[in-house]
Amino acid sequence: MATQGPIPEIVDPMIDPRTGEYAVIAPGHTFKSVTQKIAGIVLTANTPWAWVGGLFLAATIATGVVIAVTWLVLKGTGIWGVTIPGAWGFAIINFVWWIGIGHAGTLISAILLLFKQTWRNSINRFAEAMTIFAVVCAGMFPLLHIGRPWLGYWLLPYPNTMNVWPQFRSPLAWDVFAVSTYATISVVFWYIGMIPDFGTLRDRAKLPLAKYVYGILSLGWRGSTRHWIRYESASLLLAGLSTPLVLSVHTTISFDFAVAAMAGWHTTIFPPYFVAGAVYSGFAMVLTLAIPIRKFYHLEDLVTLRHLDNMAKVMLATGSIVAYGYGMEVFMSWYSASHWEFFMMWNRMFGPMGWAYWILILTNIAIPLTTLWSRKLRVNVGYLFFLSFVVNIGMWFERFVIVVTTLYRDYLPSSWGTYRATKWDYMLFIGTWGLFTCLFLLFARLAPMIPMSEIRMMLPQTKVRPGGADAEVVVQEAL
Amino acid sequence: MPPREGVYGILAEFNTPSELVHATEMAHRAGYRRMECYTPYPVEEAAEALRFHKTRVPLMCLLGGLAGLTTGFLLEMWVNVWGYPLNIRAMPLFSWPAFVIPEYELTILFAGLSTAFGMIAQNGLPQLYHPLFNAPNFASGATTDKFFLCLEANDPRFEPAKTREFLEQFSPVSVVEVDH
């Protein structure tokens, strides 16, 4: 992921003079300095006021979830805007949107690890955390959408007195397996990644309670070489397992649509187009989180412009796949010569909800895919922050367009209706933003946001020269 | 079982991975076998010097994956063919292509869990107490920026004075005796 291009004239210490690229880590760091920097965020006794304020605000917004869910449990899904024919509304849109956001975390932690993209090391931990919190928000929606969430365990295959079992030919049953496996493996991968860092926190903590808690969380990690080798082997295997997993999860979600015989859903392009869209929105969310975090905690040395540039490039690539998907949908609605497909596309573009389609084109295609080609804009932090919101809005509208415009005008004009979300839909959706932010802020305060052991591995001091102490003089001079 | 009293081993502290790897290699050549390196990040060269190559973690992953696949297949087949047969769109009861996704997910689930827990179990974790935590300089260094080599007392070649002398020739930052 190297940006080739003319070397800027201004001498920037962050730019490697040999390649003209931004460095992945600022020069001059040692094992100790990176450890102090990252562990210091967690172990400081002074909780920043901005953090407290942010948590308060996020918790206030998150109460929307509590209120909306309480009312839903009391009254039933009738308080939502879902009706016939638009039986899938915000719940499914938000479910797909949130889980798609999570996918970038797994892509960064697993796929980029397998591709030996070491720049990912400094962003992978909080991207994984983002995945887990996004899955928490996502998982809530289908569970509530089933109407009686306290009977959610009926979705699982277990022996029961009714002698009823799940129907394994249904994509909705596949979803249960895909999403629960995804949540479990993401949590396990995230925790395994943090074990050595919890060891560091245990050893650096001053507070007895912190020492105690991090000591237990670290499982007594002591950095033994034999442990490290098994640990590395397990990390690689988990990455190898997560890679097909992340692709399968959004594929399965796209099957929820593609297996149904509805115009606009019944297409073979859905799996790749959904996965690319998921990664697109996920990287946008990583930028939304990474940009304020690196500024607030002064992590510009570790999350450099190189990271932002690379993430913007991934967005450019996945965004282009999504654009191809949109193009193919339009083409196939004409080329299939299916009356229903053609009408669906016409209705999607120019029907009563056509505005949603054009917002989607504007925010997912027109703004990002024209500007991300410019290197100047890719390393412009303010612009990327703005763009990350644009793409997140765009990807939400993509799901809105897919779910709503197909359903509200189906085969029989006599059954046409419309879809209008209610205040409870909005309250629950906005509440999940608060919940997500709350969880993320707690994570940033209590756990190492950047994997310390992996950052240490990226420093030039790790080079081992044969000959021990004598060679070390040479090494020190070379540094 | 190692003795629970007396000396656990002698711990040498180094500033750089090169010195650690060199000392470990020399200790291996001198005939020491019961020894271990402790580093703040994985140092593969140290594992080479310890002659530690093979782990059983990949085997656990494979076995877990096969168990998951079998579980998924048997579960779905039993449920849809015998336990609760339903006629869906006149598909055959044993419609195996439709079973692939839950099988696939269970394969990954079982493989992932057995890899993670297998790794932890093989490492003997959780082990909240270890004699090395008694060493005054271990906790502040091993997980931050120092590199340690411990020659353990249950090695047949271990003799407190001679082993200490052996380690001191590699000019470590410190050499300390660690008690149980």
Image: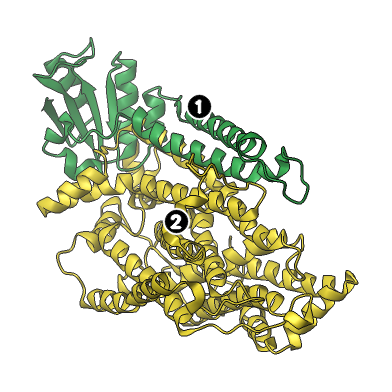
Chain colours: A yellow, B green
Residue at figure coordinates x 58%, y 31% from the top left: B70
Question: Mark number for residue A473?
Answer: none
User: In the image, what residue type sits under mark 1?
Assistant: Leu
Residue A466 seen anywhere in this rendered image of the structure:
no
Residue that label 1 marks: B59
Report if the CB atoms under discs 1 and 2 are less than 8 Å apart: no
Residue A376 placement: quadrant:
bottom right
Nearer-the-camera pick, A438 or A162: A162
Residue that carries the numbered disc 2 in the rendered image:
A151
| Percent coordinates x, y for residue B87 in the rendering | 72, 46
Say if labels 1 and 2 share a chain.
no
Work out whether A78 lies above or below B160. Answer: below
Question: What is the quadrant of the N terminus of chain A in the image?
Answer: bottom right
Of the pair A434 and B27, the residue shown nearer to us? A434
How packed mark 2 is, by other alpha carbons closer than 10 Å (few <14, some 14-19, many 20 or more), is few
Residue B6 or A417: which is nearer the viewer? A417
Find residue A150 and report its image quarter.
Answer: bottom left
Residue type for callout 2? Leu
Q: Residue B179: horizontal and vertical position, in percent?
A: 10, 25
At horizontal 49% and vertical 72% (from top left) the residue drawn is A77
- The image quarter in which residue A428 lies: bottom left
Relative to A248, A127 lies left or right: left
Q: Residues within 10 Å of mark 1 (few under 14, many from 20)?
A: some
The vertical placement of A296 against A184, above or below, is below
Query: Is residue A308 something one can see in this rendering?
Result: yes
Picture coordinates of residue B92, whole percent (x, y): 76, 41
In this rendering, position of residue A320 left or right of residue A117: right
